[in-house]
């Protein structure tokens, strides 16, 4: 009997806390049953665990549920589905508030890692990969921005402090909204969480792609700068 691949042993989960007014338990359980039955229709659904309610001193009851899917992609598909959003909207009449935490072991934000919190260490890729990928995304944005502003004569007379804050706002927005999601998705085969063992060949391929991309961009930008000087 062969063991499954290591990455198949780590599933993706969504932990949700619903705050329900006392006396609405039955309505909540009926609503939650509909949520579970709907989620079963989505690919990758494994199971849902509904914990015993926590009865607080305030006139509320806290219900905790954990949805399990077989991959970050399938969990995200269900989380972003119109079915789930409609059910959450209808549930507003039953629970007064809710909050959740997704443990997708994928790429939350840039890398799905909350640095500085030991509970979440290891959810993101190793730091050396994070550094390389941030440089890969940041370098072309900064270069294109600098070249464009130089050609258009934007902020040339501004003080360094003033131009820097505007540049940083533009760079950070482009990086977070467009560049890093694009880059991390293309390199997802390489940007595995630190606790997952990645084959040496995969690590070499990913590192080589980043290195070659950076070298090519340096060559291209040097050529563009030479043309501008002429």
Image (spheres, grey):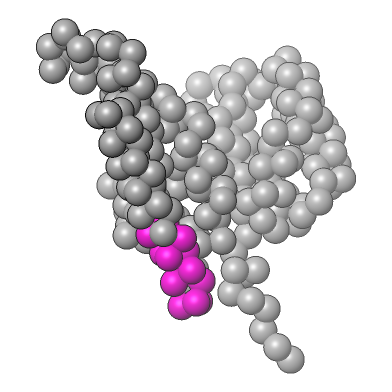
Between 222 and 126, which is closer to the camera in this rendering? 222
Q: x, y (%) of residue 101? A: 53, 40
Residue that lies at the very extreme toward the bottom in this rendered image: 1
Residue 4 lies in what quarter of the image? bottom right
Q: Is residue 168 visible?
A: yes
Between 13 and 169, which is closer to the camera in this rendering? 169
Q: x, y (%) of residue 207? A: 41, 64
Q: As displayed, is residue 84 above or below residue 76? A: above
Looking at the rendering, in which quadrant would you find the C terminus? top left
Q: x, y (%) of residue 200? A: 46, 78
Q: x, y (%) of residue 112? A: 46, 47
Q: As displayed, is residue 110 above or below residue 147? A: below
Q: Residue at x 28, y 36 (%)?
A: 226
Looking at the rendering, in which quadrant would you find the N terminus? bottom right
Q: Residue at x 48, y 69 (%)?
A: 205
198 lies left or right of 170: right
Question: Where are the magenta residues, as a range?
Answer: 199-211
Q: Residue at x 50, y 21 (%)?
A: 58
213 lies left or right of 78: left
Q: Residue at x 66, y 21 (%)?
A: 95
218 lies left or right of 58: left
Residue 160 lies in what quarter of the image? top left
Based on the picture, tell me whether residue 71 belongs to the magenta stretch: no
Between 47 and 53, which is closer to the camera in this rendering? 47
Q: As displayed, is residue 204 above or below residue 32? A: below
């Amino acid at each position: 009997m062969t063991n499954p691949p290591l990455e198949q042993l780590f599933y993706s989960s969504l932990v949700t806390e619903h705050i329900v007014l006392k006396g609405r338990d039955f309505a909540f359980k009926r609503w939650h049953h509909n949520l579970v039955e709907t989620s079963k229709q989505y690919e990758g659904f494994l199971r849902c665990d509904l914990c015993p309610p926590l009865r607080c001193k305030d006139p509320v009851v806290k219900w905790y549920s954990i949805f399990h899917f077989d991959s970050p992609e399938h969990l995200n598909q269900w989380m972003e589905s119109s079915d789930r959003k409609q059910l959450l909207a209808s549930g507003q009449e039953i629970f007064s508030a809710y909050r959740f935490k997704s443990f997708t072991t994928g790429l939350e934000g840039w890398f799905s890692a909350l640095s500085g919190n030991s509970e979440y260490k290891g959810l993101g890729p190793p730091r050396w990969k994070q550094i390389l990928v941030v440089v890969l995304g940041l370098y072309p944005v900064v270069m294109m921005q600098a070249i464009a502003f130089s050609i258009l004569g934007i902020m040339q007379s501004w003080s360094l402090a003033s131009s820097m804050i505007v540049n940083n706002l533009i760079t950070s927005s482009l990086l977070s909204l467009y560049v890093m999601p694009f880059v991390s998705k293309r390199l997802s085969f390489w940007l595995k969480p630190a606790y997952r063992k990645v084959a040496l060949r995969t690590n070499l391929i990913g590192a080589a792609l980043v290195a070659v991309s950076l070298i090519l961009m340096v060559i291209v930008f040097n050529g563009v700068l030479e043309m501008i000087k002429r």
